[in-house]
Each structure stands twice: as C-alpha cells, then as structure tokens.
Image: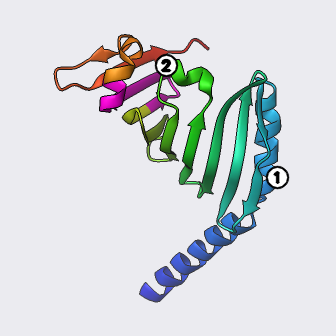
Amino acid sequence: MVNKISKFTAYTLFFLLALMYFTPKLSLYYFVEHQIKKYGVIIDDEVVVDNGLSLSIYDAKVNVKSIESVKIKDTQIQLFGFFNSVSLRGLELSSVAASLVPTKVESVDISYNIFQPLNLNAQAVGEFGEADASFDFLDFAIHLELHPSQKMLRDYRQTLSNLKKSKEGVYTYDKTIKH
C-alpha cells in the first residue's frame, strides 16, 4: 500500500513538473502582452527568456497610453498552477510620477494561490517605504497598507493626505472598483 502511494505521488509530481516545464510560457506572455495592448499598455524593448519552470523578462519599458510609465530591470514569472508569482526588481517610475511618490522601487512581489482563489496579494519595497496590497476579485476591492519611509513622510505629504493614517503610523487606502 505504501509503495502504491509513493509511486502515485512520484508520478503526479513528475507529471506536474513536466506540465510546467513544457507549458508554452513565451506564447502565453505574448498573448497577455497583446491583450493588455487594448487598454493602452505597451511593453517595449524587453528580453524574454524561458527558463523551463519560470519566465524571465529583462529591461522592459512599460508605456501606458503612449506615456512612458516605468522601466523594469528584472521580472521573474513563475506559474505553478496552485501558486503563481511575479517578482519585479529594479523599477524606476517615470518622472511624471515624481510629484506624487519617489520614483525608485526596489521590488514588487505579486502572488496568487488556489487556497485563496479570490485574492491577489502584493508586497513592495522602495524609496516610499514598504507596502502591502491585496485585491479581492469578488468585490473588486483594493486594500493598501503603507509603512512610509522618512523621505515619503517629509517630501510627499500631499500624497499621504489622501490615505487614512492609523494610530501606529500605518497609512491605508481602500477602493472598490466598479465593474
């Protein structure tokens, strides 16, 4: 009985790894890129590499409605079915955003798992401080918690005035998107 269970587990694991390895990640990436173009989002000058179990994208420039919005040094996309993640490193926001927030973002990590199928979670670290965000697919609700840096507190008071401040000094933002 134990032998059958271990064989079943090994075959299942092998099948899942083979499925992830042979998934046409480049085709999926270009399909998504084509779909977001409809919303005015264009990704240029990127180098896309299929690493077997993940997809790497280097030196991407993202334009929104013909405005250069962000440069992303390194992106790692992992699609495991039950757990999916996108890790962005070395982001530099456009100078247009400089009046609202600091433009250097060290990292953004976005994750989705089947154990919380209605939520998308993200964490970000940058000159602005640290932020945790979540998106609820059922209510189309965004929740953001910002632990601002000294630079953010000093130079971006106007932006922080649009957020709710807790007694602990954490700033929050909640918004429901109409769909």
Q: In which quarter of the image is the C terminus?
A: top right
Instruction: Give the camera-side residue of 57 and 177.
Output: 57
* Residue at which label 1 appears: 27
Callout 1: helix, strand or loop?
helix
Nearer the observer, 56 or 126: 126
The vertical placement of 95 against 110, above or below, is above
**Residue 18 among those drawn in magenta:** no
Q: Which residue is drawn at 42% across and 15% down?
A: 159
Q: Are marks 2 and 1 in contact (CB under 8 Å)?
A: no
Residue 117 appears in the picture as rendered = no
Q: Disc 2 marks which residue?
A: 100
Query: Which amino acid lies under the numbered mark 1 shown in the image of this protein?
Result: Ser
Q: Where is residue 168 in the image (x, y as percent from the top left)?
A: 17, 26
Give the SS element for disc 2.
Answer: loop
Q: Tell me which amino acid carries mark 2.
A: Leu
Residue 172 image-quadrant placement: top left
The image shows residue 156 at horizontal and vertical percentages of 39, 19
- Please provide the residue range marked out in magenta: 134-153
Residue 81 appears left or right of 142:
right
Q: Report the residue at 69% width, 54% height from top.
A: 58
Q: Is residue 20 left or right of residue 177?
A: right
The answer to which of marks 2 and 1 sits earlier in the sequence is 1
Residue 25: which quarter of the image?
A: bottom right
Badge 1: residue crowd in 10 Å (few <14, some 14–19, many ≥20): few
